[in-house]
Structure formats: C-alpha cells, structure tokens
Amino acid sequence: MKKWRNDITQIELCGILWDTENTVTDGKEYFTWEEAQELAKEKGKRLPTKEEFKALSELPHTWDPDKKGMWFANTRNNLKKEDKSLFFPASGYRFNSDGELNTVGVLGFCWSSSAYSASSAYVIHFTSRRVYPEGYNFFLCGFPVRCVLN
C-alpha cells in the first residue's frame, strides 16, 4: 500500500480503521461497484457500509478550498491536522456511458458495500457545503474507492 503523511496508511475514525488515501491500481482511480468490491477484497479489506459512511458524516468535517476536498476528524481541534484526520478529495466521477470524467474539484464520491437495488449501491458524496452519506448510484458509474479493514 502507498504510504502517506509520514508513513501513516490508516486512521481510526468511528471505531473503524480507514485507509488514508483512495485506492489506485495500475494508475486507475475510478471503479464500477463490482470492481470496487473485488479491489477491496484483493487488498484484504472491504468497502465501508452505508451506516459507516453515515457515522463518518456525523463527525466534524470541513471543506479544504486549497486541496479541494473534505476533512473528517473525531474533534474540531483535529480538522486539517493530517495525522489525526481523514481527507477525501473531490475526485468527481466517470460516466458509465462514455467514461468521461466530471466534477473533479467540486464533488467527491466513494462506493459503499451496501447495495441499494439490483442495479445500484449507496455512496457517500459531498460538496463544499454538505456531506450526503446515503446517496446512491448505478453500479456502472466510476467512483473512487476508500477501503477499511475487516
């Protein structure tokens, strides 16, 4: 796994050990839901559940206009202190129809392990103003992956 922030690769928030970075494999950053599930499994990890994303969204969080993303921390005092908070970049997404990349720097998304229907799953997504922990989207869309330990 890629090291980040003084070799910190995981951080505990909400009683869960989160990877500190989105997963990138062979230069690929955006994955369908099935690919995301398989990628997490290959790394000996899993995708967070809808409930775990909801718990994360209830923590203090703040938008970082310079890095274009959202910080989450156990307390307001830890926000943006890189060794005690978790950063989600506003990575945007890829359309399932044409593969075009959209909303980079504006919206952030990550897959959950929780299916919403036979063709869609829950995602966390955020803007500079709000975190939406219970959004959902079609399996074929390309979103970043943030793994947690089993």
Image: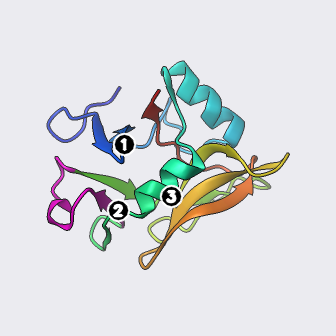
State which region is magenta. 69-84
- Separation (CA) of disc 2 from disc 3: 9 Å
Residue 23 drawn at (x, y percent): 46, 37
Q: Quadrant of the N terminus?
A: top left
User: Of 150 and 147, which appears nearest the observer?
Assistant: 150
Q: Amino acid at mark 2?
A: Leu
Identify the residue at image location x=57%, y=28%.
39
**Label 2 neighbour load within 10 Å: few <14, some 14-19, many 20+:** some
- 103 to 85, vertically: above or below: below
- 76 to 149, vertically: above or below: below
Q: Name the disc covering residue 54, or none.
A: 3
- 75 to 20, vertically: above or below: below
Identify the residue at image location x=48%, y=22%.
43
**Label 1 neighbour load within 10 Å: few <14, some 14-19, many 20+:** many
Q: Which residue is mark 2?
A: 59
Residue 79 drawn at (x, y percent): 21, 63
Asked if residue 80 shows in the view, the reply is no
Q: Which residue is mark 1?
A: 21
* SS at mark 2 in the image: loop
Question: Which of the two labelled residues, at mark 3 and mark 1, occupies the earlier sequence position?
Answer: 1
Residue 61 appears left or right of 140: left
